[in-house]
Amino acid sequence: MFDLTFTVDAQDTTTPLTLAIDHMVIAGWTGRDPVARDKHIAELQEMGIAPPASTPIYYRASARRLTQEDSIECTGGDSSGEVEFVLIGWQGRIFVGCGSDHTDRKVEAYNVTVSKQMCDKPIASTLWELEEVIGHWDRMILRSYATIKGERVLYQEGALDAMLPVTDLIARGFDGGKFPDGCAMFGGTFAAKGGIRPAERFDFELEDPVLKRTIRHGYDVVTLPVRG
């Protein structure tokens, strides 16, 4: 277990909140539309990554891979980010944030579960209460930008109506359909525009067009050399 400090944005006020996180779940293939879901599966198969055993699927990863830093270090040049909403449980409440499931694609082709352990998972420091956004959940938008060879391009974009409802995602993944305290769960992603590829910087956001606010974060990717 370890602590991360966030700012809870409740529209008219902001409150600092330190949360104890003891486990992390990466939910994959959470698309509501089977055509879009299968497109993402095909995208990964082109890279030699086997299709999932089930959809959705829930991978476990070390909670200490979560980071709020503005840079991460990755071994080799085969990793890339993925924008996702993040749920965090605390004292019976659920908060919504935004993160990047940064993943080593070369290792992913060997074993998806192992690949989830290879890279830090950047997460924004702002959270919203789920109850404030659940009524317009499907209208919220995930978006990411990749800086590749100095050029910043739109990398991913989509509304949450393309993903399984958050209540379904929780019900399928946790005993009794109850989201546990101390859990951080990444909720799935969209296909990359132009295909999955590495970048020297990754920026991501979750936009709430109804309450007119956005959670943002970005990080540089420091590539470490592979020796022998």
Image: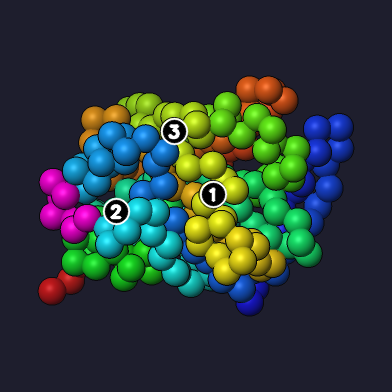
- Residue at x 44% of width, y 69% of height: 60
Label 2 Cα neighbours within 10 Å, binned few <14 / some 14-19 / many ≥20: many
Read off the magenta span. 45-51
Q: Quadrant of residue 73?
A: bottom left
Badge 3 vs badge 2, beta-carbon distance below 8 Å: no
**Of label 2 and label 1, which has the lower sequence position?**
2
The residue tagged 1 is: 168
- Residue farthest along the front direction in this orientation: 176
Viewer-nearest residue: 193 or 145: 193
The residue tagged 3 is: 162
Left/right placement of residue 168 relative to residue 226 reads: right
Q: For the residue marked with disc 1, what is the amino acid? A: Asp
> Considering the numbered disc 1 on the image, is that residue within a helix, a strand or a loop?
helix
Badge 3 vs badge 1, beta-carbon distance below 8 Å: no
**Of label 3 and label 2, which has the lower sequence position?**
2
> Considering the numbered disc 3 on the image, is that residue within a helix, a strand or a loop?
helix
Label 1 Cα neighbours within 10 Å, binned few <14 / some 14-19 / many ≥20: few
- Could you say where residue 160 lies in the image, as x and y percent from the top left? 51, 34
Q: If the image is split into quadrants, where does the N terminus sit?
A: bottom right
Residue 46 lies in the magenta stretch: yes
Viewer-nearest residue: 145 or 25: 25
The residue tagged 2 is: 79
Left/right placement of residue 212 relative to residue 78 reads: right
- Could you say where residue 126 lies in the image, as x and y percent from the top left? 68, 45
Above or below 180: residue 94: above
Above or below 3: residue 200: above
> Between marks 2 and 1, how big is the CA–CA gap?
30 Å
Above or below 132: residue 20: below
Label 3 Cα neighbours within 10 Å, binned few <14 / some 14-19 / many ≥20: some
> Between marks 3 and 2, how big is the CA–CA gap?
25 Å
